[in-house]
Image: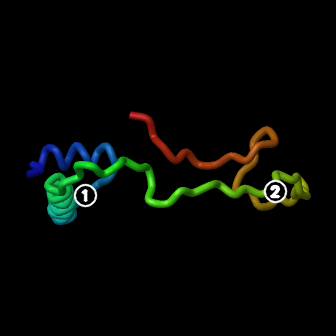
Amino acid sequence: MIDAAQMDHLASLARLELTPGEREAMTQDLVRVLGYFEQLREVDTDGVEEMQRPVNLVNVLRDDVPGEAFPASVIEALAPEMQDGLIRVPRTVEAD
């Protein structure tokens, strides 16, 4: 079972601000998901070879061919703010 302190800790790690109702719903969902992992522990996997994915995939990549670049005037017109010839964007992660 997940207690309120653990849920608060997880919410802070995910940078979520949850209302009490959202925290309760999230706790129930997480308990349900963890219950599925408990069910998986009961499955007999003796003799089953480990694998990373069920199908062998090979990356199919195109050749890296340089294309035509946008003129600087177009980029500057589309950018929200420019500084020293670079596009300035808002900070997305705040440090604690």
Quarter of the rendering containing residue 62: bottom right
Give the percent coordinates (x, y) of residue 60: 69, 58
Give the percent coordinates (x, y) of residue 78: 77, 61
Is residue 23 in sight in this rendering?
Answer: no
Q: Which tag, 2 or 1, sits closer to the chain's start?
A: 1
Q: Residue at x 31, y 43 (%)?
A: 13
Horizontally, residue 81 falls left or right of residue 95, namely right
Is residue 10 in sight in this rendering?
Answer: yes
Q: Amino acid at mark 2?
A: Ile
Say above or below: 77 vs 2: below
Q: Residue furthest top?
A: 96
Local packing at callout 2 (Cα closer than 10 Å; few below 14, some 14-19, many 20+) is some
Residue at the disc numbered 1: 18
Q: Amino acid at mark 1?
A: Leu
Q: Distance of mark 2 from mark 1, alpha carbons?
A: 38 Å
Q: Residue furthest front?
A: 47
Color style of the picture = rainbow
Quarter of the rendering containing residue 20: bottom left
Horizontally, residue 64 falls left or right of residue 49, namely right
Q: Secondary structure at mark 1?
A: loop
Horizontally, residue 70 falls left or right of residue 78, namely right
In-front residue for pair 63/7: 63
Q: Residue at x 44, y 35 (%)?
A: 95
Q: Residue at x 23, y 49 (%)?
A: 46
Residue at the disc numbered 2: 75
In-front residue for pair 55/74: 55
Q: Residue at x 48, y 43 (%)?
A: 93
